Image (spheres, coloured by chain):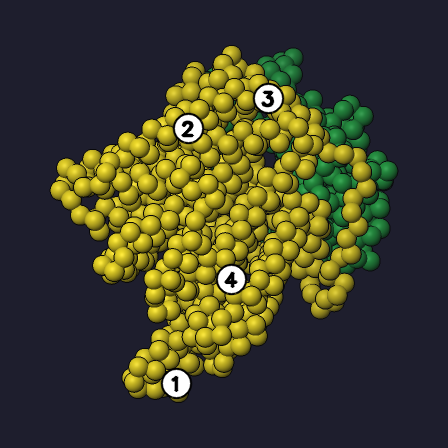
Amino acid sequence: MNTAGLLAADLRQARRRLRGPGGRLVAIALAGGTALFLGAEIYFLRLFLTALDRASALAPDLARLLLERAVGAALAVSIAMLITSNLVAALGSFFRAEDLELLRQSPLSDLALLAHRFLRTAVPASLPVMLFLLPLAATLAFHHGGSPSELIRYAAVVGAGLVLTFIPPSVFGCAATVLLMRFVPVRYATRLILATGLLFAVGGVVALRVLRPERLASPLSGLDLVAFASALEIPGEGTTPSSWAARLLIDALPGGPGAAGSFYPLALFAIFTLILGAILVRNLYATAWARSREDALPANRRPAFVLPPSRFFPQLSRSSAALLDREIRFFVRDASRWSQAALLAGLLAVYVYNLRSFASPDPLSRILLLYVDLATVGFVLASVSLRFAFPALSSEGGGIVILRVSPVSPGLVVGIKLAVVALPSFVLAITLTILTNHLLDIPQPLSGLAVLASAAMGITLPSLSLGLGARFPRYDASDPSELALSPPGIAAMLAGLAYIAVVVLLSCRPLLRLLLTMRGFPAESRFETPLLAGAILIVSIVSAWIPLRSGIRSLERSDL
Amino acid sequence: MRLRIRNLAKKYADIVAVDDLSLEIAPGEVFGFLGPNGAGKTTTLRAVVGLLDPDSGTVEVDGVDRLTKPREAKRRMGYVPDRPYLPPRLTGREFLEYLAGLYDVSPDAARPRILKHLQRFTLTPAADRLVETYSHGMKQKLALGALFIHDPVLLVVDEPMVGLDASAQALVKKILREEAERGKGIFLTTHTLSVAESLCDRIAIVHRGRIVAEGKPSEVTAEFGRPGNQLEEVFLALTSEEEETPGSKT
């Protein structure tokens, strides 16, 4: 068997999984969530491009620079995301996959095995990024216009260019994982790799704050645009794959100067990294894999003592107390989980500290910043939920049998897991928003509505992830934390993002009203804020209840 | 009756895993469920303990219907699968305490039982070590010890001897016998016919989801075999006519 044969077997398995119980529902949720996400992306891109058209009339060079920088920034973020997702996915496909023992003993050549592992890592890790970038390119093309043949040619060039853009970060992610597993003690290497996903999520949040996109909402001047374009500048501009890819996306547009100048550096760089990565991984992999097996053996050490938290809640039933104590013991003794939680807490502290320096004297800018902050908090909560709540049931592994044969109701199992994840998420959400309100001096009722919205997100997002994770569990997953990259994981993330968008839009309504009032429209109705608060609560309850109920029912009824 | 199964049936797509199966286990009885791979043994056990719901039929545990009153029925039984999973980041003692909590056993009642069963299965020295450091045999013994923490009246055990050395096997046989003498019903599957012969009061040989022979081991041998046949020869004669069925773990 060769790489193609192995890939065919993977495809067959994936197809069967989608045809299996619940597979159709995952496909529908995924398609719906993707459509919603892409719709929002295309809508905002079109707004941005229309604004640029207006700016272009005044300063054409500046508008083009801004477009190039914005596309470059999107590509740089995509490349960073690709490195991170490949780094995490490679841990599973190169080291933890159950079929590796069998394949390593087979007469399959090293190169065929590594090529298969690379594709098995890179293709699923790249799909979400591709889903983000293809509509970007399509919107650019359709906004720019051209004949059908020109647009087809553009699609072909951009498709090939994006594949070339994706190869280096994928190789880098895989090679870095193998390198870490070869030279760093396996226990620490694993923690480090698993923490990078979260590091990226929070890094993205901090980057967003540094860029301060809310500045674009203030009356634009040439100076603002220059400052914004400068902020979008990527270090090493013009000599990085992201800037080559950005230029390719723009230069290949019908009537443009052509993409050859960007295509060739991208192709050369991709070939170069592919060869270098293959040499590196081929030389290191055998030893790294052997080390991963040896170090995977548990050390015969005393376990960390954990004071049972149920002692502080004497009113809990015995089964609730048993489940709660076990959850906390698992969390404390799983170094990868608490180290990620600690990292997140540290980075959020840095974020809150920085927020003060972003505060502008203009009250409108500050209110706008509050909503950007609300969306940011939602994004952080969605990432945390995907990491901790979504795999909560799958991480039971074979232990689900113990729970299913016990007299404990599935609702209690899910309820305790929800309490363990949602309580910190809730506290985190309201702390961040109260701090933001205080630092930005946000008036009532806007500040109250923002706290309500973030509190609702703090409970709803973990509920949504936990419910969907329980609805589509994978008890046989070699590493449940990697389930975030599975189709149900992506569906959960998209559903979470759609929910955040609805809540932020509902919260923004008073701001819109304020703006209209300032322009002479009728003043705010006194029922508006309570109605909006009610709408946020209803949307949140529905978004939490439906997935949770579905997850519990599936846990009650599915055959094991 | 500790267990009463009536007309149990379960299909996976087109494959009939269990077909109109009925059996009873009396208090104090060790009942062995024998059959080739894919015969329907594990599916039957899983339907009894609540890991899957049958398409039709009833399961009563100590007079309680498992399908209509699952929680009451589950309190009355304990189950060890063929490959038991134990949470790696709990110690042996914590695992037993956790189970006691799940089955609503008070700490005062649980503590002496935990000590007793750790000692009974020679696990006391390892009680405060993480389960992930246990050998396969130790894990199997801990899983078996966990059966008794809530003092169930029916024990359901899938392949209890897998991974155990000779002395541990003898210990497990002795303990299961003692528990049967205390009035518990024991429902076990095994591929080791000598275990069935030496441990079980009654056996059933299941093939393609149906019971093809049932009774005391000596009665089954006498009724379905030729003079001088051992249980193994009878088993092979009753089950070996064709290839293995597609659903290997049914």
Q: Secondary structure at mark 1?
A: loop
Cα separation, mark 1 vs mark 4, equals 27 Å
Q: Which residue is mark 4?
A: A377
The earlier-in-sequence mark between 2 and 1 is 2
Q: CA distance from mark 4 to mark 3?
A: 40 Å
Name the disc covering residue A88, or none: none
Q: Chain of mark 1?
A: A
The amino acid type of the residue labelled 4 equals Val
Amino acid identity at mark 1: Phe
Between marks 3 and 1 in the image, the one whose residue lies nearer the viewer: 3
Q: Which residue is mark 3?
A: A284
Residue neighbourhood size for the residue with mark 1, other residues' Cα within 10 Å, grouped as few (<14), some (14–19), many (≥20): few
Write down which chain is painted green.
Answer: B
Horizontal and vertical percent position of residue B52: 51, 44
> To which residue does mark 2 refer?
A269
Q: Going from the N terminus, do you reach mark 4 or mark 3 first?
A: 3
The first of marks 2 and 4 along the sequence is 2
